[in-house]
Image (spheres, rainbow, N blue to C red):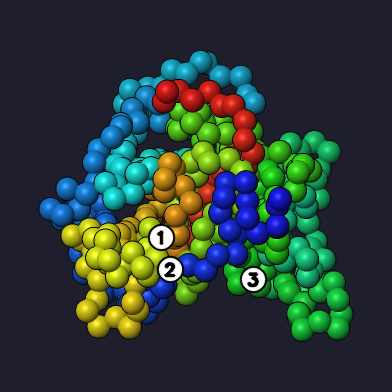
Amino acid sequence: MDDGKTRHNGNDTHALPPQSICDMYRKYQKMDDAAVDGDLHIIDFNRGLTEDQQMQLIAVDIIPSELIASAEKAFKNHGKTTNGDLVEAESLPPACTVYEHKEFPGLRLFPSLLPPESQWLMLDHLLHRELSIPLHTNNLSQDYTIPYPPHLADATSPLSFFTYPQNNKHPAFIPINPLSSHKTLNTAQFLQKKLRWLTLGSQYNWSTRSYPPSSPTPFPADLAELVTTLFKASFKPESGVVLLYSPKDYMPVHRDVSEESPRGLASFTLGCDGLFIIAKEDLPREEREQGDEPEAPPHHASSKNSKSDSPKQPMVVIRVRSGDVVQMDGPTRWAWHAMPKVMAGTCPESLHAWPVKEGGGAPKEYARWKGYMRSKRLNISCRQVWEGPTNDMDG
């Protein structure tokens, strides 16, 4: 019997996280950027892996340049007539080596998987098109009357919030309940300060931590094609949670356990760098007292001064950069994880001008918002919600 808390996958959506990952989360949340740069416990592919990290991370696959280029072309030209899948050899992006962590079967890291143009296109699709669709709920939907951009008769998608003036009183985001503590917002306050999340496809309910049996809006077809191509159809994207961070924002320790399907979850980073922490479950106290504690990997030793009585728990801290993808699959699909810190000033130069395109081609109103992503980190996690067949090309 479903008690509303325990899902079909056997996980309790209201379970409390292990103390050890909470302690580690607080440690990195308080750490300054210079200390992060010098912390060799953090897996950082740009800096290079330590000897211990090289032993823990095993290269398990390579995403060929041709496949990445073909996926990018299809993403860019979705629904358009093109000249097949041919891509000029000189324009091919680098291949992506896929790493899996020894301590976390199913935790796969795809450094720099998305080329810069794909990152730009994904931002365009998510923050212009998807954010402007009223059926896609965001963190203000329950409390505000949102002045969504109109859908012009000759356009394939609605206009963008980024065509609005920044500080004008109109259009206004007005609280639904006039007696509430919420204040009326202008567009700049909405986009720069208040917007935290957006849901695509099957609409995740943050209050009940569940999905409705049916969705009023499908997962975006072009984004689904990009994901299924890059991940060889190992899962079917049915829902996407888009998170938007500023440098002082964070995501507390949690698990993504509301989905019925155990298939992998893929999390894409765009914009500024972030720290991603993932940990295994604590053992019961009686098992710890018997001395059967799991050892922490060499690149993370437990603090001797910790007030927690948790064991030496396998835990990984990863610096994720724009274009990186983290996949949680297999035994790691339901693992505890968090984003304690976003690194200011780390957005790649290729995204500095977003939403203004070099050489023109974007609406003139976008010029007001030039540089929006320089202080933002966007994360979209794509997941399969329901059990069902997929064309699993990995066998």
* Quadrant where the C terminus is found in the figure: top left
- Helix, strand, or loop for circle 2? loop
Question: Residue at position x 82%, y 66% from top?
Answer: 145
Q: Which one is earlier in the sequence, the residue at label 2 or at label 1? A: 2
Q: Nearer the viewer, mark 3 or mark 1?
A: 1
- Helix, strand, or loop for circle 3? helix
- Are dots 2 and 1 in contact, CB under 8 Å? yes
Q: Quadrant of residue 352?
A: bottom left
Residue 276 sits above or below residue 309 on the image: above
Reading the image, the residue beneath label 2 is 18
Residue 59 placement (x, y as % from top left)? 25, 38
Question: Residue at position x 22%, y 68% from top?
Answer: 301
Residue 28 sits above or below residue 159 on the image: below
Reading the image, the residue beneath label 1 is 281
Question: Residue at position x 55%, y 61% from top?
Answer: 244
Q: CA distance from mark 2 to mark 1?
A: 6 Å
Residue 267 placement (x, y as % from top left)? 47, 48
The residue at the far top in this view is: 84
Question: Residue at position x 29%, y 47% from top?
Answer: 101
Residue 365 placement (x, y as % from top left)? 66, 56
Tell me if mark 3 has few (under 14), some (14-19) or many (20+) residues whose alpha carbon lies within 10 angstroms of its own.
Answer: some
The foreground one among 263 and 196 is 263
Q: CA distance from mark 2 to mark 3?
A: 30 Å
Q: Judge whether residue 157 can be spotted in this image.
A: yes
Q: Quadrant of residue 95?
A: top left
Reading the image, the residue beneath label 3 is 194
Please name the amino acid that badge 1 sits on. Glu
Please name the amino acid that badge 3 sits on. Lys
